[in-house]
Amino acid sequence: MHYQKAREYVLKRLENELPKNLYYHGIHHTLDVCQAVEELASGEHVKEKDLVLLRTAAVYHDIGFIVQYHNNEEVACQIASETLPGFNYLTNDIKIICHIILATRVPQNPQTHLEQIMCDADLDYLGRSDFFDITQTLKQEWMEFGIISSDEEWNQKQVYFFQQHHYFTKTAQEKREARKHKHLLELQKLL
């Protein structure tokens, strides 16, 4: 598997084809998730082939946004299925990568350890110090796409999401859960 070439291919497409009004789901988010995957995979002792599959899923997970906003995960899998054979990925490996990508759909329901790591990496920011800066970009994006129409609606959705969310891996729980809980308390004060 030629992960580095696949990564270069995806990042170039994201840079050139993502809509400019994806303030949250831009290339910066993909790179952030790739970094979080590396940290979580290390903490969860993911090695060799599984690590390549996880890295590939991370870089491909939001490429579907170049085509459509909603249900972008299915499009990401389609693009992965069409392009990864050209980077020497086998059919079964691509199937695993697609399952990892599809696991990021909200509400998250990962079935494997790799899917759990990917889900935690995708929402890693919920328990980080840069949460409030990052969440403002998602709010701006949702306003632009008509998903929310007011600050009040945004705050309600945020609190509800936080109350439903939990990290799946021990590494993410240890690194992010305490700060995430503090963020929830701050968000509840806004209601």
Image (spheres, rainbow, N blue to C red):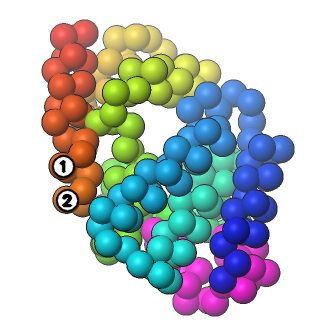
Image: magenta residue range: 80-100
User: How packed is label 2: few (under 14 Cα within 10 Å), some, or many (20 or more)?
Assistant: some
Q: Are marks 1 and 2 in contact (CB under 8 Å)?
A: yes
Q: Secondary structure at mark 2?
A: helix
- Image quarter where the C terminus lies is top left
Q: Which residue is mark 2?
A: 170
Chief secondary structure of the magenta span?
helix
Residue 133 x/y as whole percent: 45, 21
| Residue 96 among magenta residues | yes
Residue 74 x/y as whole percent: 58, 62
Residue 103 x/y as whole percent: 41, 63
Of residues 130 and 95, the one nearer the viewer is 130
Residue 81 x/y as whole percent: 67, 76
Residue at the location (29% across, 67% down)? 44
Say what amino acid the circle numbered 1 marks.
Answer: Glu
Residue at the location (50% across, 83% down)? 49
Quadrant for residue 1, please give it: bottom right
Tell me: 118 left or right of 137. left
Q: Is residue 119 visible?
A: no
Asked if residue 129 is positioned above or below residue 54 in the image, the reply reads above
Q: How far is the residue under mark 1 from the one under mark 2?
A: 6 Å
Q: Secondary structure at mark 1?
A: helix
Tell me: 145 left or right of 190. right
Say what amino acid the circle numbered 2 marks.
Answer: Lys
Q: Which residue is mark 1?
A: 174
| Residue 46 among magenta residues | no
Asked if residue 87 is positioned above or below residue 101 in the image, the reply reads below
